[in-house]
Image (cartoon, rainbow, N blue to C red):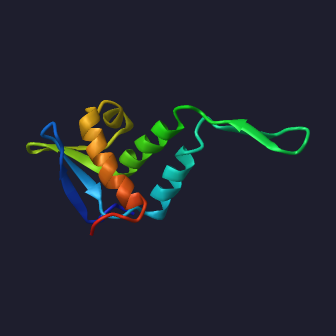
Amino acid sequence: MSDTRETKILDLPSGLKAKVVTFFTRGEVRAIKKSRWTGTEISVDENEKPTGKLDPAAEDYFDDEIVFQGVKAFVEGETEKPITRELVDNLNIKDFDVCLKELRALFLGKGKK
C-alpha cells in the first residue's frame, strides 16, 4: 500500500522545506513507541522487584524516530529527497528542532489540522 496521505510543508531555517504527515499511522506510532525502549535493560532481582537501566540516549532515539516517521521528504528547489535515517542524522539541528516540535505535538494529539 503506497502512502498517499495528505502532507503539509514546513519551512525550515536552512531554507529547506520538509513534507510532514498530518497524522501518524498505527504502524508509525508503534515504531515510535518501540524506540523509547532502545538500549533499555529490565530484569527482576532476587526480591522479585524490577531493576534495570535506561540508555542515556533513549530520548534521542525517541526524537529521531518521531522525525523519521513524520517527515516524508525534504524539498530543496525542485529536488525532493525521500527521508532516510542518514538524512535525519545529518540534518541541521535547527531544522531538526522545527520538525520535532511540529511532529511531537501531532504525536501527542495536539497538532493543528
Q: Which image quadrant is residue 6 in?
A: bottom left
Q: Is residue 46 above or below residue 30?
A: above
| Residue sitting at x 36%, y 58% | 105
Answer above or below: position of 39 versus 68.
above
Residue lying at the far bottom of the rendered structure:
113
Residue furthest left as drawn: 77
Which quarter of the picture shows residue 65? Answer: top left
Position of residue 87 measured from the top left corner of the image (x, y, whole percent): 31, 35
Nearer to me, 11 or 5: 11
The answer to which quarter of the image holds residue 89 is: top left
Q: Nearer the viewer, residue 11 or 70?
A: 11
* Rendering coords of residue 44 (x, y %): 83, 41
Asked whether residue 71 appears in the rendered view, the answer is no
In the rendering, at what x and y percent does residue 107 appear? 41, 59
Which residue lies at the image location 32% right of the left edge and 50% below the top edge? 101
Q: As displayed, is residue 84 above or below residue 32?
A: above
Instruction: Specify whether 13 is left or right of 97.
Output: left
Tell me the quadrant of the picture where the N terminus can be found: bottom left
- For the point 25% across and 32% down, the residue is 92
Q: Horizontal and vertical percent for residue 4? A: 29, 64
Quadrant housing the C terminus = bottom left
Query: Can residue 51 be seen here?
Result: yes
The residue lying at 15 percent from left, 36 percent from top is: 14
Q: How many marks?
A: 0
